[in-house]
Image (spheres, helix red, strand yellow):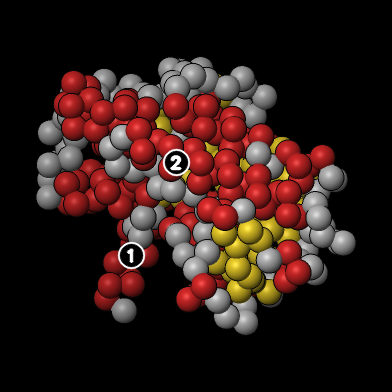
Amino acid sequence: MKIAITGSRGFIGTALVPSLTAAGHQVIRLVRSEQQRAADTIYWSPATAYVDTHNLEGIQAVIHLAGEQISGRWTPAKKKKILTSRVQGTRLLAEALVQLRQPPQVMVCASAIGFYGNRGEEWLQEESPPGSGFLAEVCQEWEAASEPAANKGIRVVRLRTGIVLGTQGGALAQMLPPFRMGVGGVIGPGDQYMSWIALDDLIGAYQHALTTLSLQGPVNAVSPNPVTNREFTKTLGSVLSRPTVFPMPSFAVRLAFGEMGVELLLSSARVRPARLLSSGYPFRYAELESALRHVLGQNALKKTG
């Protein structure tokens, strides 16, 4: 397939692009800088509401990953960037696609399990209603912004992604330094659920979504086996052969990280990948320990190689 992708230089994109090309697809990057323009790129600018639709003609699929990082303290300005980068960019792209003489067959958009909010021990799947809080509101607007493409008949898949296990970015990369020094520990009460997915499985889920015609709408991109923060902490410490005896109480999370810490570190989302499973996606790393050993072992091989 000829696939256009936004956010190709990010954590997920840098892993996804080579995987797509290895599978025989032609990848065209949508770039927001004039300096990055090349033969295999298409220029777009969410800030000025511009998309080079002429060069989008002939694209068979679109993967949309671009959006402001959610890590860091959520100032009012940061929250505005998180929301507008996702909603405006998604809507601009969806509206551009429906203007094409031959729109692509499928649009796979990033979303997040933040859609469900803080739900304790409740099992959540794609039909579950949205939760409350800033991230839940962002995810609802983010997903709704792709509706122009769905209304035109493009098959739109919204991958609600959990905590991605990789060493080049995401939550695990930030956890590793303190855990490797032996000063990691349980965060808050420890009973909050963490729904995670190995980076290799997330890349597999994107490729599965591209080619599986039965998939459309929201699709949870998480392992079938979420764990509590206490279980995650114990498993990561075991894989690293380090103690995990330095907890971070809830008040310290709130003091250090503010609203971002409450929603990302203290909230609980026990999510099931019902649609991925029913559509036949074969998870390579369904258990946390095997996923962590693979990710960390792979990183060690890269360093020694």
Relative image position of residue 97 (x, y in whole percent):
76, 55
Disc 2 target residue: 82
> For the point 19% across and 52% down, which residue is it?
177
> For the point 12% across and 33% down, which residue is it?
246
Q: Classify residue 251 as left or right of residue 86.
A: left
Residue extending farthest front: 48
Q: Mark 1 and mark 2: span between their CA atoms? A: 30 Å
Relative image position of residue 238 (x, y in whole percent):
24, 44
> For the point 61% across and 27% down, which residue is it?
125
Which image quarter holds the C terminus?
A: bottom left
- What label does residue 299 carry, if any? 1
Q: Classify residue 70 as left or right of residue 250.
A: right
Q: What residue type is labelled 1?
A: Asn
Work out whether 251 lies above or below 140.
above
Q: Which amino acid does label 2 sit on?
A: Ile
Work out whether 223 lies above or below 47.
above
Q: Nearer the viewer, mark 1 or mark 2?
A: 2
- Viewer-proximal residue among 280 and 75: 75
Q: Is residue 225 visible?
A: no
Which image quarter holds the N terminus?
A: bottom right
